[in-house]
Image (spheres, grey):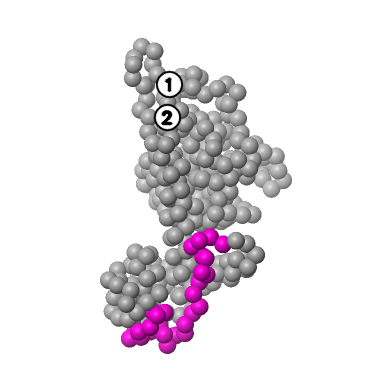
């Protein structure tokens, strides 16, 4: 069951927390499990109140955090278990369920935090959708297709990236850990749970698990090209969804063949051949005012902010 698998996550988190600085969401750690007697229908205590507050923050329908384990709390706990792949009547909470609730709360706070950071990072940007003719006039020749420096922040690049983080590997980089000894995309290192956003409109044609890619979502765009988002901890978009710039694709993770939490971003042309993601991004989400048509006073394309 998923709750049992997540106990491993809890154990690893505890080990890491003892050696690394922890995020504000985990600043107080997961509260100690108070015992089964304290978490049963009819109980009234501070532990129930703390659990209710967590469930309310997660969006479950409990009118108030009053410490009374009544019908509303029972329904909320039962729904939480059901949504996490377990069948339970909600009349009690064991140690695994307790830990799962507060892990989910931490993840939700991480999502909210990264959502806010993403919005702040893009608030002042003017992102242009460019056509090939404009690429030639807007993007400096020496920058066309040039890979970003490893270690650079994705926020500092002159084109939009799907996630805020640090560049850890670039396209065509040599390395034994990649098939063909070359890297097929760009890796952006970011904490687990960081939000991955669509930067170009597209339809989800694949949302599932694919070998080394782990949890993967593929978007197909109007020109037949596709963009791939791999190693996610959670897929938010579903097959068939049409995503607009700024819509959430999923959350950064370390699923599949990977040594750490990051987004692997990859692009393919209309024939399914892997292409340079930088060139793909530059021609679509360059952070400049759109080039203008000399014969007109208005921009050829509409600028948009994400």
Q: Where is residue 146 in the image (x, y as percent from the top left)?
A: 60, 30
Q: Mark 1 points at which residue?
A: 291
**In the image, what residue occupies the spot 48% across and 42% down?**
162
Residue reaching furthest bottom? Answer: 37
- Asked whether 103 or 224 is in front, the reply is 103
Nearer the N terminus, badge 2 or badge 1? 2
Disc 1 is placed on an element classified as loop
**In the image, what residue occupies the spot 28% across and 79% down?**
71
Quarter location, residue 89: bottom left
Q: Where is residue 126 in the image (x, y as percent from the top left)?
A: 42, 32
Q: Where is residue 137 in the image (x, y as percent from the top left)?
A: 49, 18
**In the image, what residue occupies the spot 63% across and 37% down?**
149
- Asked whether 80 or 137 is in front, the reply is 137
Residue reaching furthest right? Answer: 176
Give the crowd class for mark 1: few <14, some 14-19, many >=20 residues within 10 Å: many
* Magenta stretch: includes residue 287: no
Left or right: residue 66 versus residue 157 is: left
Residue 248 in sight in this render: yes
Screen quadrant of the C terminus: top left
Magenta stretch bounds: 22-48
Check the image and report above or below for 19 versus 92: above
Disc 2 is placed on an element classified as strand
Mark linked to residue 73: none
Check the image and report above or below for 302 versus 208: above
Q: Position of residue 212 (x, y in %)?
A: 59, 51
Q: Confirm or deny contact between disc 2 and disc 1 (CB under 8 A).
A: yes
Quarter location, residue 16: bottom right
**In the image, what residue occupies the spot 49% across and 52% down?**
194
* Magenta stretch: includes residue 23: yes
Q: Mark 2 points at which residue?
A: 128
Tell me the CA gap for discs 2 and 1: 9 Å
């Amino acid at each position: 069951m998923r709750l049992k698998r997540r106990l491993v996550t809890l154990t690893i988190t505890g080990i890491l927390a003892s050696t690394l600085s922890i995020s504000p969401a985990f600043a107080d750690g997961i509260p100690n499990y108070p015992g089964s007697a304290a978490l049963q229908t009819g109980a009234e205590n501070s532990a129930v109140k703390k659990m209710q507050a967590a469930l309310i923050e997660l969006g479950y329908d409990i009118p108030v955090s009053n410490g009374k384990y009544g019908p509303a709390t029972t329904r909320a706990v039962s729904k939480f278990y059901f949504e996490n792949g377990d069948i339970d009547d909600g009349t009690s909470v064991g140690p695994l369920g307790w830990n799962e609730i507060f892990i989910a709360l931490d993840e939700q706070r991480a999502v909210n935090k990264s959502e806010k950071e993403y919005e702040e990072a893009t608030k002042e940007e003017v992102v242009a959708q460019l056509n090939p003719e404009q690429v030639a006039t807007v993007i400096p020749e020496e920058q066309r297709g040039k890979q970003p420096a490893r270690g650079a922040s994705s926020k500092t690049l002159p084109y939009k990236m799907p996630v805020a983080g640090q560049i850890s590997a670039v396209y065509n980089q040599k390395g034994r850990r990649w098939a063909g000894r070359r890297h097929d995309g760009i890796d952006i290192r970011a904490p687990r749970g960081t939000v991955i956003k669509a930067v170009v409109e597209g339809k989800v044609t694949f949302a599932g698990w694919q070998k080394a890619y782990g949890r993967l979502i593929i978007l197909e765009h109007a020109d037949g090209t596709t963009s791939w988002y791999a190693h996610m901890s959670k897929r938010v978009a579903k097959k068939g969804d049409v995503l607009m710039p700024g819509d959430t694709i999923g959350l950064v993770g370390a699923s599949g063949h990977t040594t750490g939490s990051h987004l692997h971003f990859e692009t393919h042309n209309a024939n399914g051949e892997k292409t340079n993601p930088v060139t793909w991004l530059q021609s679509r989400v360059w952070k400049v005012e759109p080039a203008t048509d000399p014969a007109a006073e208005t921009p050829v394309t509409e600028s948009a902010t994400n």
